[in-house]
Image (tube, rainbow, N blue to C red):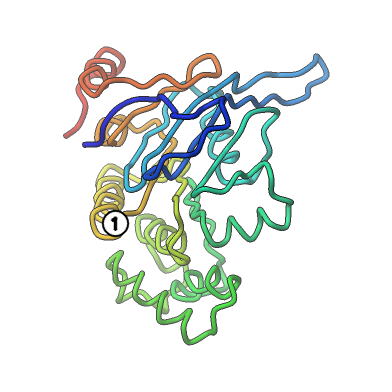
Amino acid sequence: MTDRGLDVPGAGTGGAIPDGLAVVVRTLFKSYPTPEGELPILMGLDLNVRRGEIVAITGESGAGKSTLLHLLGGLDRPTGGQIIVDGVDLNSRSDAELARFRNRQIGFVFQFHHLLPDFTAVENVMIPRLMAGAKPAEAERGARELLRAVELQNRLHHWPSELSGGEQQRVAVARALANSPAVVLADEPSGNLDYRHSGQLHDLMWRLVDERGTTFVIATHDRALAARADREIRLENGLARELPQDAVTSYFKDRAGPVRS
């Protein structure tokens, strides 16, 4: 279990980013224009994520979980504040630079696997490596290794339509790891899976942290996943509030019965 704390050393002061942090968010604001005026979603949020930890982002629907992941991944730009991922200040990068950074340093796993239907499992995992400039033989070797790591070595040449929902998500996780990213951002990764396949996907993510030191930031409503994470960060009123681990269990018991172990 990692140390706790939402304090960001140097936050708001222009100070150096300490070693060991994969993500630093400083005074983050995000709002969207509407016919009635600006709709604020994030309002001065601070967050830090250490390398090799799994952080669960929770909150009510509309609290800004997906918005936060999109900002961390450089898919959207904040209204204000600073985002530093793997030592790179995303605000200082052009759109083209952000696209290259996303391909090399960020892995994405979504609720829907978004595998390309006309490519096999191994080809889907090869694509990010090819986009990063790898030669086909090198990309295929890496893809095969990753599919072995997610226990799909016997599904290399299956089409997505020939895979179960759990297998499709495991291919999506392998694809997210193709370029050895600094951070994997997962938005409800087990949202479409049943209890058994959700558990298998969660076990896989924890094993990848143990074996590869992968950092995961996961937006989820899944009680078991949130309770199992190193830290659970709840978004409320546009800010991030960490629930102490002993409070996580009691919070979910109060809300919806016992947490699954």
- Where residue 202 appears, as percent x and y from the top left, is 29, 47
- Seen at 44% across and 50% down, the residue is 184
- Where residue 14 appears, as percent x and y from the top left, is 58, 31
Number of marks in the rendered image: 1
Front-lying residue, 186 or 179: 179
Seen in the picture, residue 63 relative to 186 is either above or below; the reply is above
- Quadrant location of the C terminus? top left
Front-lying residue, 208 or 173: 208
Q: Secondary structure at mark 1?
A: helix
Residue 14 shown left or right of residue 181 in the figure? right
Seen in the picture, residue 65 relative to 104 is either above or below; the reply is above
Instruction: Classify 10 Å Cα crowding around label 1: few (below 14), some (14-19), many (20 and above).
Output: some
The residue where tag 1 is placed is: 208
Front-lying residue, 189 or 208: 208
- Seen at 42% across and 31% down, the residue is 57
Amino acid type at circle 1 is Leu
- Seen at 73% across and 52% down, the residue is 95
- Where residue 147 appears, as percent x and y from the top left, is 35, 70
- Seen at 28% across and 36% down, the residue is 229
Seen in the picture, residue 13 relative to 23 is either above or below; the reply is above
**Looking at the rendering, which quadrant does residue 45 occupy?**
top right
**Looking at the rendering, which quadrant does residue 224 occupy?**
top left
Residue positioned most to the left: 261
Residue 221 shown left or right of residue 32 in the figure? left
- Quadrant location of the N terminus? top left
Residue 102 shown left or right of residue 138 in the figure? right
Residue positioned most to the bottom: 137
- Where residue 28 appears, as percent x and y from the top left, is 59, 27
